[in-house]
Image (cartoon, grey):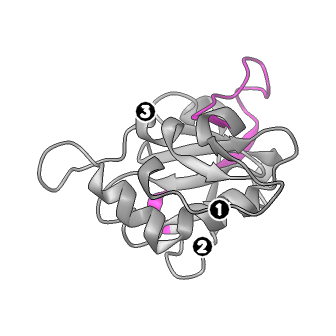
Amino acid sequence: MSDERAELRAGWVWTSLGDVCAINPRHEKGAVGENTPISFVPMAAVDHQTGAISVGSARPYGEIRKGFTHFAEGDVLFARITPCMENGKVAVARGLINRLGCGTTEFHVLRPLGGILPEYVHRYLRQESFRRAAAANMSGTAGQLRVSTDYMESVEIPL
C-alpha cells in the first residue's frame, strides 16, 4: 500500500497499524475470575452492513479463555478470513459484558494506543479500498484465505 499513498495535509503523517495499535492482544492473566461472565461473539454477530456487533451470549471466562480470540471494550474486530473480510465484517466492540469478550479465531483484534479513537481505525478498515488491498495480500488454501498478522502490522494509516 505504501506505493499508493495519498498526499496528506499538513500535520498528518503515515504510520503503520502496528505502531499505533496492539494487534491481537490477550487478556491479562487474572483480569477476571474463571466464573466471571464475559461476552462471546461469533462471526455471525458482526453485521457487515452497519459494522456493529450484537454482543452475543454470556459465558464464563474459564470456558472460553482458551481456543478463542480475546478482546476488550473499545477494541476493533476485523474479520480476517474470506469472504467475511471482503464483505466488511469490521466492528468496534461495545457493550461487552464485564468489558471483555472472546470470539471466533477468525478475528484480528486491534487495540488503538495513545488516544487514537477506535472509531477512526474502524472506519479506515471498513473502506472498500482497504479491503481490496487486504484481499490482494491474503494467503492460504482456496476457500480458506486469510489476512496475516504481519500484513495488519505493516499496513499504513494516516494520522
* Structural distance between the alpha carbons of marks 1 and 2: 8 Å
Q: What residue type is labelled 3?
A: Asp
Residue 73 visible in image: yes
* Structural distance between the alpha carbons of marks 1 and 3: 19 Å
Provide the residue designation for mark 2.
51
Provide the residue designation for mark 3.
150
Q: For residue 24: magenta?
A: yes
What crowding class fits label 2: few (fewer than 14 Cα within 10 Å), some (14-19), or many (20 or more)?
A: some
Front residue of this view, candidates 20 and 13: 13
Corner quadrant of residue 19: top right
Front residue of this view, candidates 70 and 11: 11
* In contact (CB < 8 Å): disc 1 and disc 2: yes
Q: What element carries label 1?
A: helix
**Of marks 1 and 2, the one in the foreground:** 1
What crowding class fits label 3: few (fewer than 14 Cα within 10 Å), some (14-19), or many (20 or more)?
A: few
Q: What element carries label 2?
A: loop
Taking the spot 72% from the left edge, 48% from the top edge, the residue there is: 13
Provide the residue designation for mark 1.
122
Q: Residue furthest right?
A: 115
Taking the spot 76% from the left edge, 36% from the top edge, the residue there is: 36
Q: Which amino acid does label 1 sit on?
A: His
Q: Give the range drawn in magenta.
A: 21-44
Q: Position of residue 157 (x, y in %)?
A: 62, 51
Q: Which amino acid does label 2 sit on?
A: Gly
